[in-house]
Image: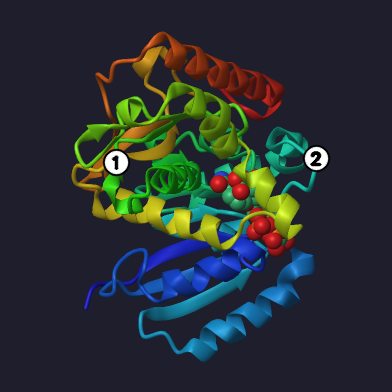
Amino acid sequence: MKEPVRVAITGAAGQISYSLLFRIASGQMLGRDQPLILQLLEIEPAMEALSGVVMELDDCAFDLVKDIVATDDPNEAFESVDYAMLVGSRPRGPGMERKDLLEANAQIFSDQGKALDSRASSQVKVLVVGNPANTNCLIAQRNAPHLDPRQFTAMTRLDHNRAKSLLSKKLSVHVSEVSGLSIWGNHSSTQYPDVSHASVRGNSISDLIEQTWLESEFIPRVQQRGAEIISARGLSSAASAANAAIEHMKSWVQGTEEQIVSMGVYSDGSYGVEPGLIYSFPCTCAGGNWEIVKGLEVNSFSQGRMDQTEAELIEERDAVSHLLPD
Ligand code: NAD
Ligand code: LMR
């Protein structure tokens, strides 16, 4: 049996976590042979609710779970963790953009970045889910100077999956037949879901679907899918977000083989994106590392969309400059 790894999940009494924890505990993220210790963080008013979630985890009698820590202290939650999933933060409601949450949530990620820096394993892999995810991730990363910026990622896998599902419906094929998609930029309504390198059964999607549908229906629908769900459910996406978080971590840890996935990662200047931003790129993963897929041709339409979402990320970064130590 492998040694247990430590997994921290913040916002552990929230709605995403209610879908996330039980799947992680049953081995769906790190494998059926990987024991784990769950380190669950909440704020003080939610600790009673969290105690109920812990009772339910106990009542599942998961064979992989070796211990559960429930705390409102980030230092305790992040002690020696190998994986940190930063979910805890306020979700948006109807009529809001995700960046409207910046003021409410930014401080959380500054504090948690510092706690990760001092307490987590030096190899910790961090996924930020809480919105606005890219800029919250940037804040956490910049407050953790002893960790490699490549250890911090933001979630755009949900957008990637949404795009894949919409294309499969349009082309009446199974989702598994759609490949080569990418989400560029921000997890926001400026994100650019790009099909220029995507294909189905060896055929380029650009040859199968007219550009007008892509521009007038597909791109806006993916960009606005979060709002569409909020309007229908009265609450933001939860089970699909938890699923995407599991897939993001699973890809990062177990590898993607030749599959392209979308991840918000530290920009090294690839594709002319400002270095240091947390920007979603097409990525592949192997050996526990992610790499940006290099050398894709970018046409002028794509470049315009990539620039637009980059500009929004720069604007968000500048709005939180007081939380970004050099
Ligand atoms: P929720 O309100 O149901 O749960 C959030 C939980 O976080 C609450 O239990 C709250 O007490 C806790 N929390 C707040 N501040 C905290 C702190 N400082 N430390 C620890 N816990 C804290 O919200 P949810 O639906 O689970 O969504 C969580 C976040 O995820 C939101 O910001 C939402 O917008 C975002 N989200 C992102 C994506 C994505 O694709 N990146 C998808 C869906 C939701
Ligand atoms: C989503 O994309 O579903 C989440 O980011 C929640 C939201 O605010 O849209």
Q: Is residue 56 left or right of residue 250?
A: right
Residue at 57% from the left image edge and 27% from the top image edge = 216
Residue at position x 69%, y 26% in the image? 320
Q: Secondary structure at mark 1?
A: strand
Residue 95: mark in rendering: 2
Up-down relation of residue 126 to residue 205 (above or below): below
Q: Secondary structure at mark 2?
A: loop
How does the figure colour the protein chain or chains?
rainbow
Q: Quadrant of ligand 1?
A: bottom right
Residue at numbered disc 1: 179
Q: Is residue 307 above or below residue 323?
A: above
Q: Is residue 319 visible?
A: yes
Query: At label 1, which amino acid type do we have?
Result: Ser
Numbered disc total: 2
Instruction: Give left or right: position of 33 versus 14.
Output: left
* Rendered location of residue 248, percent (x, y): 40, 50
- For the residue carrying disc 1, how many other residues have a C-alpha within 10 Å: few (<14), some (14-19), or many (20+)? many
The quarter holding residue 194 reads: top left
Residue mark closest to the camera, 1 vs 2: 1
Counting residues from the start of the chain, the first of labels 1 and 2 encountered is 2
**Kind of residue at badge 2:** Gly
